[in-house]
Structure formats: C-alpha cells, structure tokens
Image (cartoon, grey):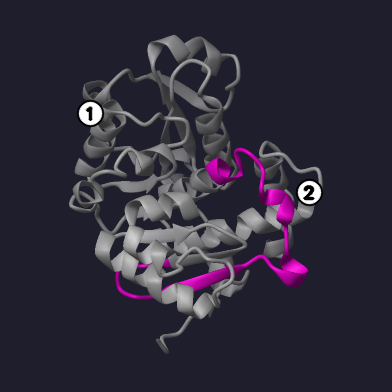
Amino acid sequence: MGRELRLIEGDAAMRARLFKQGAAHKYAHGHALVLAGGLGLTGAARLAARGALRVGAGLVTVAAPAAAMPECAAQLTAIMLRQVDDADALAGLLADSRLNALCLGPGLGVSEGTRQMVTVALAVQRATVLDADALTAFAEVPEALFARLHPATVLTPHGGEFARLFPDLAKQGAADPGRPPAARAELVRAAAERAGAVVLLKGAETLVATPRGACALNDATGPRAAPWLATAGAGDVLAGLIAGLMARGVDAGAAAETAAWLHVEAARTVGPGLIAEDLPEALPAVLRELAG
C-alpha cells in the first residue's frame, strides 16, 4: 500500500500525445489491424475498428474469415478488409510490418483457433490489445497467455474476465466496486506485474496498471458519471481506441489511460440514450474541446 494512484485527466501531456504536429502521410500515423469473428459476429470488431480510425490511426483494417467477408464489406468504407481464416493466414498477413498495432478479442469466439491467433499475434512483438474472447480463451490456462505477453500488450478485462485470468486477485476484491480504488489498485498492479503487460480493469472506476507498478484511475463517478456506458459494444470501442493510439506510437500504458479518458468523455458528450455506435462519432467534439 501507499504507492501513488494518479488520476487520469485531460491535461497537457494528453494533448501532446493526441495532437502531434507534422507527419502528414497516413502511414506515419500507423496501421491498426482488428480481427473479426465469423458470420453474424463481426459487429464487435467493426466497432473497435471505427474507434481506432476516429482516434487517429492512419489506416485500419478488419481481418475476417471468408464467410464473414460480405457482412463486413457491406458495413465498412474507410476501413479496409482482408480475409483471414486461421492462424496461418494471420501469420502471412503480419509479414507486412506496416501493421503496427493489433486488436484481438471482440467477437472472435472462445476456441483453440482464437488461442492460436493470439499466439501468432504476440509472437511478432507489436503493440497488441487483447480484449473479451482473446482473454476468455485462456481462462483455463492463464499462465500460457502470460508466458507470451510483452510490455507493448494491453489486457482490457471487465470484472468477470479479470476473475478468469487472476482468480486469486479477484477473490481479494480487485473488481469489487465497494472497495476503495487505492486498495483495488494494489491488486491490479499485482495482475500487471504477473502478466508482464498493461492491465486495464474496466468499471466506473477504471484502473490502468503497468508491469513496473504504476497505476492510474479513470474516475467516472460523481460529476463525471456516465452510467449509459453500460451498453453492448462500448468495451469494443475502448479496445479500438487503445489500438488506434498505439498505432500512432503512444506507449501501452499511456494509450490505455488516454483511451479510458476519451471513452468516458465521448459518453458524456452523447448522454443518456447512448449506444456503442455513438462513441466513435462523438470523438471529434471531445478532441476539439481538448485541443482548446
């Protein structure tokens, strides 16, 4: 106990990360790749991809299996589309080093195939966000996941996913909203240190911890509350925001913190009645206000 718990704010450091000058070519702002699930399951990946594009990634591609390609093509315009049916196909696609940030998990399914694709993605040592199914797929063997993680990885569990990967820490109350954030922060720090990656534990009091022991709080309670964020797909957008920021060169911890703050501000801009699709579209107004 006693280690600093910083409050995430829209300050000068955040503005510097978001509003870099120069580097006008799209590839200078990175290329994010988001993996999609099968037919009827691509919405989550498309939400993540839209978040990555809105937060400033120069290019965004959704990779989907053959059966889901028409579904994605009917919905995507500025976001590109590539066919990826399995881990071997993903490995081939990742031969292109310009794909510098990866997002896996939203709608991907809980299967051996998902575990294989996560393994391939982590092997190339690029900025990576693991969310949702990419976490749950390792629920029975979390150590197998931790052994492959690297410092440029962000895990984005909600309370249930956190408990699957870190059952002992969950029993101590890591995701218990009734516990003070400072007490919970110590447990999330322990999770990040164990995993060797950034851990963002979602909630009204979102905590972002790094493997080095730093921890920050994104407080969405009181005057900053946005309870309408509890809607399907909101977490997928958050994963995409992190991936988009990392594509632009923001380090894992700062990307997670910045994305968490923007996520809440976008929700507050929309207000009650929000659905996940609204979040990326609210970002320009949030960024304009932040820029001053």
191 left or right of 262 in image: left
Identity of the amino acid at label 2? Answer: Val
Q: Is residue 68 above or below residue 112?
A: above
* Dot 1 amino acid type: Ala
The spot of residue 10 in percent (x, y) is 63, 69
Which residue is drawn at the image coordinates 54% and 14% (left, top)?
71
Discs 2/1, front: 2
Quarter of the rendering containing residue 249: bottom left
Q: How many marks?
A: 2
Specify the quadrant of the image occupied by residue 134. top left
Magenta-tinted stretch: 209-237
- Quarter holding the C terminus is bottom right
Residue denoted by label 2:
270
Residue sitting nearer the eye, 30 or 112: 112
Q: Is residue 40 above or below residue 275?
A: above
Which element type, helix, strand or loop, lies under badge 1? helix
Q: Is residue 173 left or right of residue 55?
A: left
Find the distance from the CA under tag 2 to the CA under tag 1. Answer: 39 Å
Q: Which mark is residue 245?
A: none
Q: Is residue 196 visible?
A: no
Residue at screen point 26% across, 21% down: 89
Residue 262: x %, y % from top left: 62, 57
Residue tagged by mark 1?
A: 91
Q: Residues within 10 Å of mark 1 (few under 14, many from 20)?
A: some
Residue at the spot 61% in from the left edge and 44% down from the top edge: 234
Find the residue positioned furthest to the front.
171
Residue 263 location (% of width, % of height): 62, 54
- Mark 2 or mark 1: name the one nearer the start of the chain: 1
